[in-house]
Image (spheres, rainbow, N blue to C red):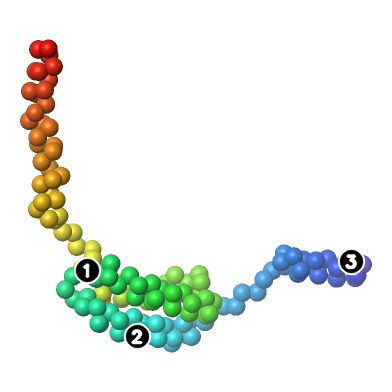
Amino acid sequence: MALTATLLALVFIWTGMAVKYVPPCDELSFQSNVHICLSEFNKSMEMSGYHDSCPWPTVKGIYNNLKVCVEALRDKTWCKQHGSLLDNVYLPVHQTYFYLCGQLRDPPLMTAIMLIAPCIIVTLCMPCFCLLLNHS
């Protein structure tokens, strides 16, 4: 009986069906090391001139480096399920560097004209076209 139980336990362990131990999130280590990722990002952003307009397309690579760094730190400290830790990292970054990106702007004048003009022309020409078809 003991041999059967031992064999059954070994089979479960070898096949991965046994409960796996996941260590708890080391929040202190995450919080104390995330400044390394943020300092590199901050240095790169200061050189990009983000104050003038939305910097998004030009700083995508810098932002991806921050994301990779934070995700590696998250995986290293076993904080995969703690979204609030990541929110505490990304929200200040977005409020500082990407606050201009959410503002809506009108398109350039030529773009607006090119979008509106065909509708106006078709609306004005449609009665003439219908009259021409009815008289034929």
- Residue 135, image quadrant: top left
Lower sequence index among marks 1 and 2: 2
- Residue 2, image quadrant: bottom right
* Residue named by callout 1: 54
* Residue named by callout 3: 4
- Residue 66, image quadrant: bottom left
**Mark count:** 3
The amino acid at mark 3 is Thr
The amino acid at mark 2 is Ser
Residue 122 in percent (x, y) is at 12, 32
- The circle on residue 73 is none
Residue 118 in percent (x, y) is at 13, 38
Residue at disc 1, secondary structure: loop
Mark 3 burial class by Cα count in 10 Å: few <14, some 14-19, many 20+: few
Observer-side mark, 2 or 3, equals 2
- The circle on residue 39 is 2
Residue 45 in percent (x, y) is at 28, 79
Mark 1 burial class by Cα count in 10 Å: few <14, some 14-19, many 20+: some
Residue 85 in view in this figure? no
Residue at disc 3, secondary structure: helix
